[in-house]
Image: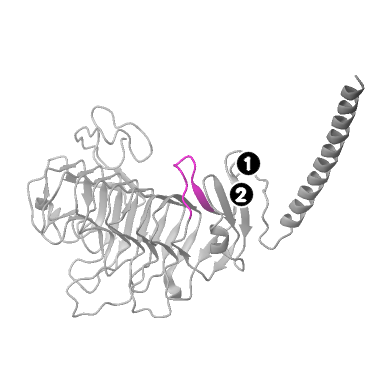
Amino acid sequence: MATLNQRLSSLERRTTTLEMMMATLDERIAALQGIAANHETRITALEGTSLPPPDEYQIIATLGPGDDVMGAVTFLGPKKTILLREGTYPVSLRDAFPSGLSWAETARLQAYPGEVPVFRPIAMEEPLRLDGPNLVRFVEFLGLRFDGSGNPDPTIGLSTIRLGNCQYIRLQDYEAYGSHSGMGVSITDYCFDTEHLDGRIHDNGLLVPDPAASSIENHGFYGRGDRHLLDRMEFWNHPNGWHVHLFGGTQSDYIIRRSIFRDNGMGMFDLTGGGITLGGDRNQLYLCAFWNIAGYAIEWNGSGTLTGGHLVAHNAAYQVAAMFGSPARAINSRILNNAGQAMLAGVFQGGETTALDPSNQLVTFISPPTDFHLLAALLGVTVPEVPTDLNGVPFGSSPRIGVYAT
């Protein structure tokens, strides 16, 4: 009995010692948290209704223009966020990004609520480049601006954003501009499944190209790869190219919808300064508005190569060279319910022409380009992939052509 009591007494002493050790450990953790909160990289969890709930995403750092952003990026991972404060960052976001696990568990670089961080490297680098040796997947860039004008040699065709060896990348509420002689966004053959949401791509490739060149590639968005989404985007001022160019290699299964293509003037080559050129197969373009464009609003593969299986429906154009260029190249495609007014070339379609579905018509809009509602209702055909109009109103069983149901 005495031995049992001695053992219980010894256990109680050990328990007391363990409790004291735990208390000391708690004090040390609290002290470390206090130091971290005052560290120059401000590693802390911030309060704010517009930030992700702490149980969903961990904010591992809040950084400013003078901090080591790429150093902090190495600590990113699934459900982890870095917040970026207002200001200009003279560095490039490049290649070495840890991946997330899924769209529900991404790694994030995010603007601090209400602030605008701008990445403008002053070296020969793209502001954002994901094209390193390791595949990067499930990363989000939210609320950031990318300025390519810092390139010290404007004759080198660096894009503002280059997406290469990556998959499942989301850019939302972003801006890409300033590339002197390159693209705003360049997607390579090795990039798949990206999302571009609520973005603005403008003023890229403004340097006059070599007049002796046989072609140019100073486009707003140059798309290869497959399965990319562009939704609620806006493009302007790429006079030496197209706002969106899906051309060469693989560039299939794109969805481009609810976007604006505007203000693109004549460049060095015939009918440049265009809206969008479609290559590849099975691309969808719908509920988009085009205006003040010196070239075609929509063209099919400028090389003369046949391209097919596309859906081009419920788009509107005003003061463009023609609504369509070379639709004869669009084999096995549905071109439906598109409306245009004031074609600068005097024709609805140019280049290689073909008979179009009668639901594509010249119209009169109420007040283009601010109001693309039809002055007089013209009925088209039902397009199952486009059940609602630009405002979310159902088209119904007797849809009007253009971008609005009423």
The colour scheme used to paint the residues is one colour
Q: Which amino acid does label 1 sit on?
A: Pro
Disc 1/disc 2 C-alpha distance (Å): 8 Å
Which quadrant of the rendered structure holds the N terminus? top right
In this image, 11 relative to 101: left or right? right
Q: Residue at x 16, y 43 (%)?
A: 309
Q: What residue type is labelled 2?
A: Ile
In the displayed structure, 385 sits above or below 165; it is above
Please provide percent x and percent y for residue 329.
Answer: 10, 52
In the displayed structure, 254 sits above or below 177; it is above
| Residue 54: assigned label | 1
| Residue 138: assigned label | none
In the displayed structure, 155 sits above or below 309; it is below
In the displayed structure, 261 sits above or below 360; it is below
Mark 1 or mark 2: name the one nearer the start of the chain. 1
Q: Residue at x 11, y 57 (%)?
A: 305
**Residues at marks 1 and 2 touching, judged by CB atoms closer than 8 Å:** yes
Residue 69 picture quarter:
bottom right
Q: Residue at x 36, y 64 (%)?
A: 184
- Check if residue 234 falls in the magenta segment: no
Residue 297 picture quarter:
bottom left
Please provide percent x and percent y for residue 370.
Answer: 36, 51
Front residue of 310/298: it is 310
Q: Mark 2 points at which residue?
A: 59
Q: What stretch is highlighted in magenta?
A: 98-109
Q: Main secondary structure of the magenta part?
A: loop
Please provide percent x and percent y for residue 61.
Answer: 62, 55
Front residue of 234/162: it is 162
In this image, 278 relative to 139: left or right? left
Residues packed near mark 1 inside 10 Å, few (<14), some (14 to 19) or many (20 plus): few
